[in-house]
Image (spheres, coloured by chain):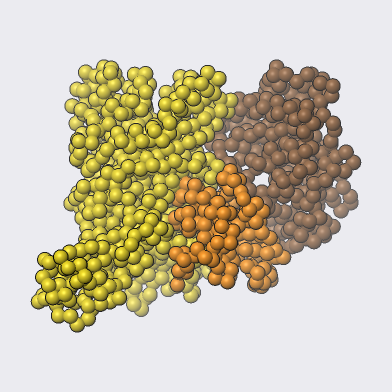
Chain colours: A orange, B brown, C yellow
Amino acid sequence: MQVTVSVNGEERAREIEPRLLLVHFLRDVLGLTGTHWGCDTSNCGTCVVLMDGRPVKSCTVLAASAAGHEITTVEGLERDGVLDPVQQGFHEEHGLQCGFCTPGMMLTARALLDENPNPSEAEIREAISGQICRCTGYATIVRSIRWAAEHPAAAGAAAETAGEAAP
Amino acid sequence: MQVPPQFEYERATSIEQALELLARLGPEARLLAGGHSLLPMMKLRLAAPEHLIDIDPLADELGYVREQDGELRIGAMTRHRELLDSELLRRRAAIFADAERVIADPVVRNRGTIGGALCQADPAEDLSAVCAAVGARVVIRGRDGERVVVMPEFHRGPYETAVGEAEMVTEVRIPLSPGFGSAYEKVERRVGDWAVAAAGASVRMDDGEIARAGIALAAVGAGVTSAEAEAALAGRRPSEEAFAEAARLAVEHCSPVDDQRGSAEYKRHVAGELTRRALRRATARALREEG
Amino acid sequence: MSTTEERPIGFGRLKRKEDARFIRGQGRYVDDVQLPGMLHGAVLRSPYAHARIVSIDVSAAQQHPKVHAVLTGRDLDGLGLAWMPTLSMDTQAVLATDKVRFQGQEVAFVIADDRYAARDALELIDVDYEPLPVVVNARRALDADAPVIRDDLEGKADNRIFDWEAGDRAATDAVFARADVVVSEEMLYPRVHPAPMETCGAVADYDAVEGSLTLWSTTQAPHAHRTLFALVARLPEQKIRVIAPDIGGGFGNKVGIYPGYVCAVVGSIVTGRPVKWMEDRSENLMATSFARDYVMRGSIAATRDGRILAVRVDVIADHGAFNATAQPTKYPAGFFHVFTGSYELEAAHCAVTGVYTNKAPGGVAYACSFRVTEAVYLVERMVDLLARELDADPAQLRLANLIRPDRFPYEAKTGWVYDSGDYETALRKALEMAGYEQLRAEQAERRERGELMGIGLGFFTEAVGAGPRKHMDILGLGMADAAELRVHPTGKAQLGISVQTQGQGHETTFAQIVAQELGIPPEDVEVVHGDTDRTPFGLGTYGSRSTPVSGAAAAVVARKVRDKARVVASAMLEVSADDLEWERGRWFVRGDPDQGATIQEIAMAAHGTVELPKGVEAGLDSETVYDPPNLTFPFGAYLCVVDVDPGTGKVTVRRFVAVDDCGTRINPIIIEGQVHGGLADGVGMALMELIAFDEDGNCLGGSLMDYLIPTALEVPDWETGFTVTPSPHHPIGAKGIGESATVGSPPAIVNAVVDALRPYGVRHVDMPCTPSRVWEAMQGRGAPPQ
């Protein structure tokens, strides 16, 4: 079937099998491999993307169902070479180690801050409680999101050490 | 990762069209609402419908919580997240917020719907117990019209409901009355886990007495409601003794099993404990007119 | 050259260099590898724990229009690849030929155009099994009537794998015989799983013309894997390139070679196209390296006034259906010797019996430091049981028995020589950070009100950095690690290392080590790892060995460069090398500091035309192989506060204080991150993680719905502190840190739970302390998990 999904502000039309999961549409069809997957049962949250601004588990959404919705992936966080404060916060506060859960965590953080620009530690923990990180023990993720809350427009200036994008 | 088996995909943009498709495609067709019950089953190849009818376009039409004719009315496509955030529900039936805080996780709650949850009818599912505890009725629509059934009629057993082949749930209705209070208590091994045991309770207070009580347990092999326990409370003044008696009756009529979540013996114990706690909070809320 | 806290030249709180790609979603993990013409593999697994394979019919699967090939054990047998060696010198079936020995064992491999089709085709394979009796309980594995699992091994008539002991049995018996107080307890360290967020997988690309194989795989040890593939697949080693790209967490899960990797390689050879295989989560949990599964009976002997005299322990070690634990050859129970803990003992003895069961193979994984996890849990639970018996305060009992600083290097009763330690300082610091006295007062008040609050202590000594290579090898490969440092003419450097990051931040810390030694900014040092074509040989990252072994190699090779630079500088400055002095980044003439040359200037000159002394070659590049003289012994004092709901048995971790000592601290940000992660692991193991089986051998923890890992809501905001006691034998004084918290935290949490339940007379609860299990313990009916 033909599906058209808006991903990071761009309409992407592709011919797909109806059963294709959104996570595979993003990764395998569009090549946006920043969205990861880690389980089969909607428990790990590694595959989180934003659907109309809200975090969803893309392993449990059909690509076909995403038609007509706006999808944001980690690749859509940086705008015009300026990191999102959330991205900067994860770097500043060591909110990542292996980096596998990081895209999903950052997107949930973005959605949280859009609704609640000054979340408490408890609100942050609640917001990310559908996503598992095996490396950080979460404390630095909480601090990273707090950093982003406290620096809503700081990312561009502070991007010095995190500025070297991978080749 | 695991992937669903093949199926034909249809998209319904109206209730009528969804019902039309259901009738035309027959028993091997399933509705896809939020997908958070059905798609995991399909990935594990425990479900293999030939046709999926995606009702995502109905999210707006069937996504609402409102008060009408002395009832709370919740559209079947209302997502968990909306139930949790609803000011109206918090005020009039606080049990929903209690339960929604501990249903799955915040990301799943952004997608999963009340209709999907009730139709999945998982024995450990929370909203079935919530709806049963508050005496909810479920609106089932078919091509020939709609019928309204009470929860004990709707929920026929594990994974089985009163929804017929070419029918769909469109709304949940909760009767409102003064002096109403409700609460939900759950023990889980971890946030996002299914309940080890859970108890929902509601009371309608009248002149210092419990005029009507609703009690429903989840995950412990109980009936849709704990009718004996409800009956035991009717007409009594709230007290620890009355709650303990109701809890004892509720536990007597459940039949939990040993599994990884806990022993049957523990589940029995904790079902009683949670019933008492839920009744205490529901009563306190009723006395404060907090729903 | 200035050093600031924010932008240190050497050691310090440098933010991670590798973050740049990860925060942009530009990390490249195995499943991100896309090659032209790539096919996808899927593994058919056994639904039975023990069954004879009567027949396998793959014809329907082969006819699937998108299927390219279906491999079975018989196909592999023809290539001599149906069985492969394990890391413990046992053999393991790649695809089962005779019978299946655990649920989830690999039976067939389908290669198709895409992963959806490969998954579909699995359902078209028809296997006829004849079920056999099953043994899953390690305590029953040696019963006379237990089914023999490994009848493929010649002459094998039981399920015994090994018997191993350490310490002095007679001396220990003698001490126990005269001790005032003896306390014993049986405890299970249950089977758990590392479950990294990225599952295991590989992309194999065999080039038939060149006869070369490129393998991208989720491996913590790319060089060791290359050698093993050379030996197993009989491919020439110079034609094999193993690439471990970004790895989404390892924790020991990615040390071994799994049948899926081998199948991907064979699949690529058979189809002539690249083949990707990524396991799903159930496969990861059900078939790859689990951890622990130690049934331990411990005893502790002491004087009435609280002096600990001896510890002994008997263990049944469940290794599953194949002995595939990853540990040094001479150490079948890993470094379990450290069950002597952090205490001055008169005697100690342990005996470990390894057994086969119808469960997945593995045993050493999940940040366990080669069984130190089990050892520390045992001794720390025993000390708490002793405190209870003596009615002593657990903190005071520990303080009275910890090894004193002047006793280091300390030879423990099982032969390990602990390199350095100041245990009392660490414990006192933890008690102070926690406000121990106030906590005990609060606990007393709460108990009056019927509330259950628990305070648990744990002190650990870790043994990491395997190993001295004459004692330690894996499949004959000595556990040394190499480093090579290239210094380009502009003074920028590239460090090649043999260890492999799975999130530990090697690209940052290893650059800092070189920066510290050469005085150049860490940004100028590119760290290369995870590619056998671009890095020198070494054994990889596990058992917290990166810093102790490879970190030492990095320091040593940087010092070699510095020494060479001195010779070049002497030629540049026309003075004797003996007259040169070093300050960070620069050699200068003693007594005339203006006369000097920076590393950058020296590097240019070394590649330039300066005349060098006879026998000195141009350039500054150096390499080294580091063979550690001993393990390093990090340590720490942990304190946990829990609250237990008396009505439901639900445990909440309210606080966790961790004081760690890992010697010299290269990057405190990264160290704290490692500690945090390990503490969350500890909460998981203590409260919820469990791979259980039913009597038929069905795995009950085969998805993340059933195998529970803590979320942000089950863990507190960690309170960390540190002391610094450098390792005397490590070039920069550093010890490992990656696994300390995983090792040290479970006993602190369980001690806290048991402490909370004291009013109920509970003396022990086996992990995981789920609400149900805690409540049952409160009723006096606690039992080990199945």
Q: Residue at x 75, y 62 (%)?
A: B11
Which residue appears at 35% of the width and 55% of the height?
Answer: C12
- Residue B261 in sight here: yes
C544 displayed left or right of C755? left
Q: Looking at the picture, tell me which residue is in the foreground, C56 or C627.
A: C627
Q: Is residue B45 above or below residue B130?
A: below
Q: Residue furthest bottom?
A: C609
In this picture, residue A24 sits left or right of residue C436:
right
Q: Which x, y percent locates residue C691?
A: 46, 41
Question: Is residue C361 among what the camera can see?
Answer: no
Could you tell me how many numbered marks the image carries?
0
Residue C434: which quarter of the image? Answer: top left
Instruction: Measuring from the top left, give residue C688's x and y in whole percent.
Output: 50, 38
User: Which residue is at a point 67% across and 53% down the rendered structure image?
Assistant: A115
- Taking depth in this image into account, of A51 and B268 the one nearest to the observer is A51
B51 vs C344: above or below: below
Query: Residue C53 location, x and y as percent?
Result: 44, 51
Q: Quadrant of the N terminus of chain C?
A: bottom left
Residue in the picture at 30% in, 29% down = C399
Nearer to me, B81 or C582: C582
In the rendered structure, the answer to whether residue A82 lies left or right of residue C744 reads right
Residue C2 higher or lower than B117, as above or below? below
* Between B225 and C74, the one nearer to me in the picture: B225
Residue C549 coordinates in the image, percent (x, y): 26, 54
